[in-house]
Image: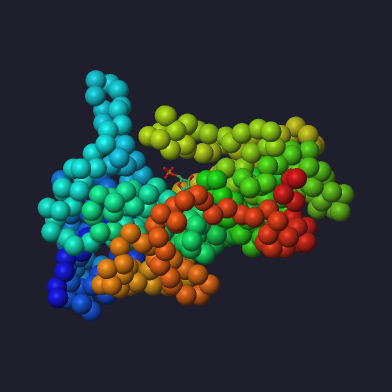
Amino acid sequence: MSKTIAILTGGGDCPGLNAVLRGVVRAAVLQRGWRVVGIEDGFDGLVEGPRTVELDSAAVRGILHRGGTILGTSNRGNPFAFPVREGGETRLVDVSARVVENFRSIGAEALIAVGGDGTLKIARRLNELGVPVVGVPKTIDNDLRKTDVTFGFSTAVDIVTEALDRLHTTAESHDRALVVEVMGRDAGWIALEAGIAGGADVILIPEIPFDLKKVCDAISRRCRRGRHFSIVVVSEGAFPAGGSKVLQLNAKQNFGVERLGGVGHFVAGEISQCLDMESRTVVLGHVQRGGTPSALDRILASRFGVEAVAMIERGDFGRAVALRGRSLVTVEIEEAVAGLKRIDPAGELIKTATELGISFGN
Ligand code: F6P
């Protein structure tokens, strides 16, 4: 029987979102004869309007390799705490009833919410309010529980690895310590995996608070071995033992979400102070989220999109698709968003990196 389904992409964008949209449309429109309605700019498109766009097979032509999302996204529009400006002040207002009403006005039987932790939390609450929701986990941070990997992560790791390869040659030519700040929020997956792949000498992650003296010791040991340059990868959420994360904006200043950034400059400054060595910082920032998705991300995103349609067909609501090992599974959204998936400091990946001679500054 023909159905209409809706889809939105929420939170920060990441490579592979368009591959999900294409997968959903191909499975729903071409294979099942359903109609797919795209909601623009994440939940904002349901708070306002509704603002929608028809996703037929022509709409998703040629987008598999494109980064970003053709639907647009927003990481500010939480309908349960929506920022409304009044008299020069911003108040957070619960507009979820309007979102449910607008969703119903579209005539869709289900909503696919593609997003990270924040988007899936909203999706779970909307599901409780009677919107049949299926979740698709995405984030370059790879910090979602209940899925071994999220799409976007592999591309981000590839981008950082390529940057480290390039930075090696200039660091070596100038005998410098290059500190490379990468994204990841409160999980150090990008720093750890790209650091290993890119031959970093020091990796600083939020899961292992660092001691600057130990960081400097590691760099000095390299100098004594005749290696007069070092590459330090620092995750944006890393912080010194007994200290705290470096923020650009706190949650109050940024619609309830901390904006991280600046730890790279802090670490580079300290290295120049404690060692007789020039140090520079490179902040890779949103470069890590942009551009062409890797083959791995395209495949995972396509699988997630196709499975989301199958979940709707089975009436598997309130759940998200996930990857366990090499297989797709479905999990309760509630479990997926209950806490973050962070690196185990006693885990195999940290042990491997340590055996490779990488210092975590601890
Ligand atoms: O969650 C993905 C992410 O890219 C984080 O790694 C980073 O801290 C944050 O989003 C940046 O968000 P924004 O695009 O709002 O600067």
User: Which quarter of the rendered picture does the N terminus lie within?
Assistant: bottom left
Up the image or down, 251 lies above or below 204; here it is above
Tell me what residue is drawn at x 31 percent, y 31 percent. Answer: 92
Please say whether residue 308 is visible from this viewpoint.
yes
Q: Position of residue 157 (x, y in %)?
A: 55, 59
Tell me what residue is drawn at x 84 percent, y 49 percent. Answer: 221
- Farthest-out residue, bottom: 31
Residue 263 or residue 119, whichever sits in front: 119
Q: Is 1 on the left or on the right of 141, as rendered?
A: left
Residue 162 occupies quadrant = bottom right
User: Which quarter of the rendered picture does the C terminus lie within?
Assistant: top right
Q: Is 152 on the left or on the right of 82, as rendered?
A: right
- Farthest-out residue, top: 87
Residue 98 or residue 159, whichever sits in front: 98
Residue 117 or residue 228, whichever sits in front: 117
Q: Position of residue 341 (x, y in %)?
A: 54, 54
* Colour mode of the rendering: rainbow
Q: Where is residue 212 in the image (x, y as percent from the top left)?
A: 74, 38
Tell me what residue is drawn at x 69 percent, y 63 percent. Answer: 348
Q: Position of residue 311 (x, y in %)?
A: 31, 70
How many numbered marks appear?
0
- Farthest-out residue, right: 224
